[in-house]
Image (tube, rainbow, N blue to C red):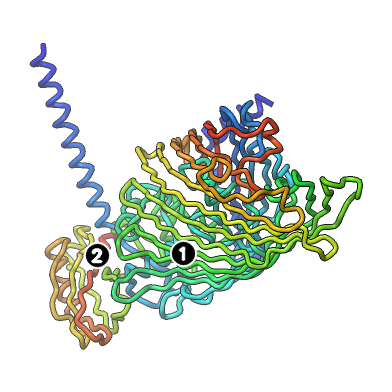
Amino acid sequence: MYRRIVKLALICLFADPNFLNAQDFKILDRMVQVHGFASQGFIYTNDNNWLTMNTSQGSGAFTDFGLNMSAPVTDKFRVGAQVYDRNLGQLGQYHPSLDWAVADYRFKGWFGIRGGKVKTTLGLYNDVQDQDFLRTFALLPQSLYPADIRDATIAHLGGDLYGNLSLRHHLGDLSYTAYAGHRSDSLYSGIAYIASQYNFYYLRYGGLQYGGDLRWNAPLKGLLIGASRMNEDLTAAANFINPLNPGAGIIPDNERSKTDWTNQFYGEYTVGKLRLDSEYRRFVHDQTDEVAETVILGTDTDVRGWYVSGVYRVMKRLAVGSYYSRYSITRSSAGPLALLFPDQTDTSLPANHVYDKVISARVDLNRFWNVKVEGHFMNGYGDSTYPDGFYPQVNPQGFKPNTNALVIKTSFHF
Amino acid sequence: MRMGRRIQWQSLSALLVANGLILLASLQAVAGSVKVIANSSVKSDTISLVEIKRIFLLEANSLDDGTHVEPVLRKGGHLHEAFLREFLDTNDDSLQAYYGTLVFAGKGSMPKELSSDTEVVGYVARTRGAIGYVSTETSTEGVKTLTVLNAGNSAQRKLIKRVDPEYPQTLKRLSIGGTVRLEVTISRKGDVENIQLLGGNPILAESAIFAVKQWVYSVSHSRTTTEVDIPFDARP
C-alpha cells in the first residue's frame, strides 16, 4: 500500500505535463474532454471530534474524487456529466453520486438554458465547493459552506436560465442565473446523520428548490458584488422510534419545511496578488414532523453566517491565506416532543455558535498537485438539531467550548 | 575586506536592477507584439477588447453579427502571459482557476491550449470560428488578423468602412514589422476626427494613420475615442 502511494506521488510530481493534462478523444467527430480530481485530507483536533471524524485521535477519513466528461454537440449545444464520491467520517461512505449531468444550450452571450442535474449557483463557491484545488483554503468557511451538509445546496434536478450582460456607460457586466428544480439529499449526509441521534431514520429527503443569483463585475477592476436567493419546499419520510416509548416500534414520520429560504450577499476584490472575499448567508428553516397526520414537533431554525477572508500569492508556487468565520444558530420548538428540544436563543453561548479563525498555506508542487496546511482556532460547537460540524454521536463525552484543528490536505486534478 | 564586500554588494545590486529593467523591457516588448487571429469564417475584420474578454472568459460563443467563435490559447510562456495581462487583465493561475470553476461545475469546457504559434495558426486556420493570438512576427497565412478596438464601448461604434494600410516595401523587404497603436477620435457622424500615435515604428505609423483616417464608423450620439492596434506582419 505504502509503495503504491509513493509510486502515485512520484507520477504526479514528475510526470510529463501533457500526460496529466485533460484527456481528449473524439466520438462521432466531436471532441470529448475528460477531467478529474481527487483529494485526501487529514485532520487532528485537540478536543471535540469534528465533521463526524474521530479527529481527536487524528483522522484521515477525508477523501473525495470525481470524474467528468463533456462534449459540444453543436456550436451552441453542449452536454456533460460528473460522477462524485466521498468519505468524510461517517458521511458519504463511498456511495458514488451523479454530481451533475447537463445539457446546455447557449443562444447568445446574454441568454442560455441548461437542464438536467445542475450545480446550484449560490454565492461565490457553492457550485465548486468540492474542488478545493481551485482555492487556497483546505476547508471553506464552514459558516456558509458546511462540508457535512453539502447536499443541501449542491445541485438541483431541473433547469437554469443564465447569461451575461454588458452594461452601457462603462458600468461593468452583469451575470444572472435563475433556477428551479428538485433537491435530493443523500442518506449519507449530515442531515440524515444528525437526525439518527434523535431516532429519526430517513428514507428520503428533498423537495422543490428555486431561486436566482445576480452578480456585478463593477467598473473598478477586480471588484465583484453579488446576491443569491433560494426558496425551498422540502419533504422527508423517516422511520421514528419514540425514545419515550420505544416499545411502540417503528413509527412512520413525515417532515415538511414549506417556507425555507436562504439569502446570501457577497463581494470579492482582487488587486495584484491579493484577493479579499466576504460573504453573508442567512438560512431560515421551518420544519414540522407529523406522525399519523398529527404534528409531534415543529421547529423554527435561523442560521446566520459570515466570513471575511484574504489570500496572498507570495510566489508562483506558494499562497497564504486567512479567514474569520462566524456562525450562529437560534431555534424554537413546539409540539408534544418539544420538551426534548429546549429552545436556543442566546447566540453568545458556545452551544449556539462557532467562531473560527483560520490560517492557511498552499504549496503547488506542480500545475496539477498541491498540498495545504491549515490551522483552525474555533470557539463554540453549535449543538443543535441542525448540523454544523459538531455531532453528539462522535462526542459522547460532551462538548468542550474550544477546538483547535490542524488540517493537512493534498489535491490532484487534471 | 569590508570595503571589498560593500563593492561586491553594490555590483550585485546594480546587476539585479539592470536585469530587472531588461526583464521589464522585454515583457513590454512582448506585450506590444501580440496579434489576434481568426479563422476565415469570422466575418468581421475588427474585434473589441470587450468581445475578446467575453470570448476568452467563455461568456460568449458568438460575435454580435452572429458568427460562431471559440477561443484558442497558448499553453504558458511570455506571449501567453502578455496576452492575458494586456487583453484580459488576469494571469495564468487566475485564468486556469476560473476555467476550473466552469469545467468542474458543468458550466463550460476548457478551451483548446496549444504549445506554439505554429500550432495556433494551424488550428485557427482549420477550425471554424477559432480565435487565437500569436506573436506579430509569426506567419499568419491561412488566417485573418483582426484589428483590436480597445475602447470599452467601442463595440457600439461599428467599423463600417475599413481601409488596410500599405506596408512600405522597403520595411517589408527588411522584415521590419510590429504593431502600431493609435488613439482614434471618432465624430458623432462616424468620421475619424483625430489620430494620436501611442506607439510603434514611426514609418509604419505614417502608413497606418493614412489608412485609419479613411475609416468610417457607425453614427453615435456623442464623439468617442478608441484605441486601435494595426499589426504589420513582417513575415512573407
Q: Secondary structure at mark 2?
A: strand
Left or right: where A407 falls relative to A398: left
Q: Quadrant of the C terminus of chain B?
A: bottom left
Please determine if labels 1 and 2 lie on a single subunit.
Answer: no
Q: The disc numbered 2 marks a residue on which chain?
A: B
- Residue A341 vs A226, above or below: the answer is above
Res A334 quadrant in image: bottom right
Relative to A8, is B112 above or below? Answer: below
The amino acid marked with disc number 1 is Ala
User: Nearest the camera: B153 or A52?
Assistant: A52
Callout 1 crowding tier (Cα within 10 Å): few <14, some 14–19, many ≥20: many
Q: Residue B232 bears which disc, if any?
A: 2
The residue at the point 31 percent across, 56 percent down is B135
Residue drawn at point x = 41 percent, y = 60 percent: B121
* Residue A330 image point, x, y percent: 57, 52
Indicate the chain on which mark 1 is placed.
A
Viewer-side label of 1, 2: 1
Amino acid on which the number 2 mark rests in the picture: Phe
Residue A7 tag number: none
Residue located 66% across and 48% down the image: A342
Estimate the x, y position of residue A13 in percent, counting from the top left. Answer: 52, 33
| Pick the front one: A173 or A46 | A46
Q: Which residue is mark 1?
A: A227
x%, y% of residue A154? 61, 57
Query: Could you say which quadrant of the image residue B86 lies in?
Result: bottom left
In the displayed structure image, the side of residue A306 where residue B172 appears, left or right? left
* Quarter of the view holding residue A295: bottom right
Residue located 32% across and 76% down the image? A168
Q: Is residue A325 above or below residue A159?
A: above
Q: Give the alpha-carbon distance from disc 1 to disc 2, as whole Å.
A: 46 Å
